Amino acid sequence: MNNINGHGGGRRSAMASMDFYRRVPKDLTEATSLGAMMSIAAIAVMTILFLSETIAFARTSMGTAITLDENDQPQIRLNFNITLMDLHCDFVSVDVWDTLGTNRQNVTKNIEKWQLDEEGQRRIFSGRNREQREVVHEEHEETLEELHEDGEQAVELTPDNFQEFLNEHEMAFIDMYAPWCIWCQRLHPTWEKFGEEVHKLRMPVGVGKVNCVTYPQLCKDQKVMAFPTLRWYKNKEMILPDYKMDRTVDALVGYTKRKLEMEEKYKNWAANNPSDNRMKPSAGNSRPEHPGCQVSGHLMVNRVPGNFHIEAKSVNHNLNAAMTNLTHRVNHLSFGEPITKLAPHMEKTPFMRKVKRILKQVPEEHKQFNPMDDKEYI
C-alpha cells in the first residue's frame, strides 16, 4: 500500500507543477494596517495626478520658444506696401543689402508705383519700377565765362525781380539750381547757349535761372524738390510736370517749340470756336501733381541678416534736402507667401477649424502677425 500511495503522490506532484492558475497562500491575502495605509496613499496620489493632468489639458497657456526653420529654400519673400506722403515717384528707389554682400540698388522686379493725390488716393499709375534713364548732357568747348562775354541771355532771378520777370513774359522757362550740384554745373553752359538760341530765333519765351543756395526761400515757395529743376511758366503759373528729358540745346529748343505750337493752336482754336469745347487742343496747362507715391510689391531676399531701404535719390538730380520729406506710412509688411482668402471648401476642413479654435484662445496682444501695418513714421 505504501509503495502504491507513494507512486501515486509522485504523479500528483508532477501534474501540480503544470498548473498555470496556482492559489495564493492565505497569509498573503490577509489585510494589514500597513497595506491599508499604502493603498490609501496610492489612491490619493493617482487622484491628484489625474486631476492635475485634466486641468492642464483643459487650460491654455502662452509660451515662447525658438525653433529652427525647416524650410531649406535659400530665399524668403518680403511683401511691402508703403506710402510716401510727399516724395515724387521719380525719386523713389528700393535698395537691398545683406551680410552675404548683396547690394542691389533700385530694384525693379515685382515692384509697382502709384502717384497719389492730395487725399492720399491713387491717381496715376506710374508703372512698374524701372531703371532711371540717364539724360544726355551736352559738352561745350567754351567756358561759362566765355559765353558771358557778350552778355547773359539766361537772366539771373532774385526774390525782387522773379515776379516781375513772370509779368513781362507770358511764357518763361526757368532753371532752378544749386552751385554745388554736379548736374547743375554741367547744365550751366548748355542753359546759356539755349538762352542765346531763344534770343536768336526771337521766341517769345523768357529764359531765367535761380540760385537756390542764395535764395532758398524763393525755391521753397516754388516747391523745388531737386536740382536742377527746369520749369515752364505760363501766365505767371508753373506748368507741371517739370522738364525731365535730355539736357542739350537741341532738346531744350525742341521742347520750347512744342510748347509754343500748342499754345498757338489753342489760341487759334479759341478764336474760331469760342463756345465749343469738343476736340479742344491741349494748351500745355498744368495738371495736378501732388508729390506723393505709393510703392508696393515683393522682394526675394536671402535668409540672412540684412535690410531693405526705400531711399530718395535720382541718377539725374541732386535732391534738395530742405524739401525732401520722407514721412511715410507702412500699409503692409510681412514675410512669406501672402495669405489670401481661402475657398469655401478649404474653410471647413478639420485643420482650419482647429486653427480657428486655437486663434480664438490667443489674447489680442499676442496676435502680432503684422506688427508694423498701418503705422506712420515721420
Image (cartoon, grey):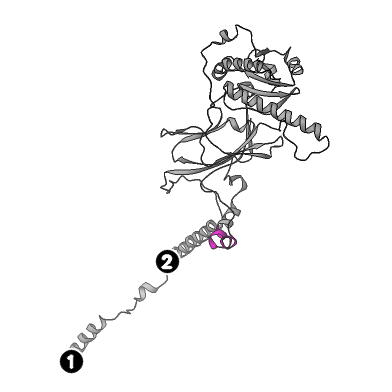
Residue 359: x %, y % from top left: 58, 53
| Helix, strand or loop for disc 2 | helix
Instruction: State which quarter of the image contains the C terminus.
Output: top right
Horizontal side of residue 97 vs 312, given as left or right: left
Question: Nearest the camera: 309 or 252?
Answer: 252
Residue at coordinates 53% horizontally, 56% vertically from top-left? 56
Q: What type of secondary structure mainly makes up the magenta span? A: helix
Residue 27 sits above or below residue 327 on the image: below
Mark sitting on residue 256: none
**Residues under labels 2 and 1: Cα distance?**
46 Å
Residue at 21%, 86% (x, y): give it.
11
Give x and y (percent) for residue 149.
60, 6
Give the residue at mark 1: 4
In the rendered image, residue 59 lying in the magenta stretch gets the answer no
Residue lying farthest top? 149
Where residue 183 sits: x, y (%)? 55, 20
Q: Earlier in the sequence, mark 2 or mark 1?
A: 1
Residue 349's place in the image compared with 205, above or below, is below
Q: Is residue 29 above or below residue 160?
A: below
At mark 1, the secondary structure is helix
- Residue type at numbered disc 1: Ile
Residue extending farthest right: 275
Q: Of the residues shown, which amino acid type is indicated by label 2?
A: Gly
Q: Which residue is mark 2?
A: 35
Instruction: Specify the quadrant that holds the N terminus.
Output: bottom left
Q: Which residues are magenta?
A: 341-354
Q: Is residue 212 visible?
A: no
Instruction: State the residue at coordinates (26%, 81%).
Output: 18
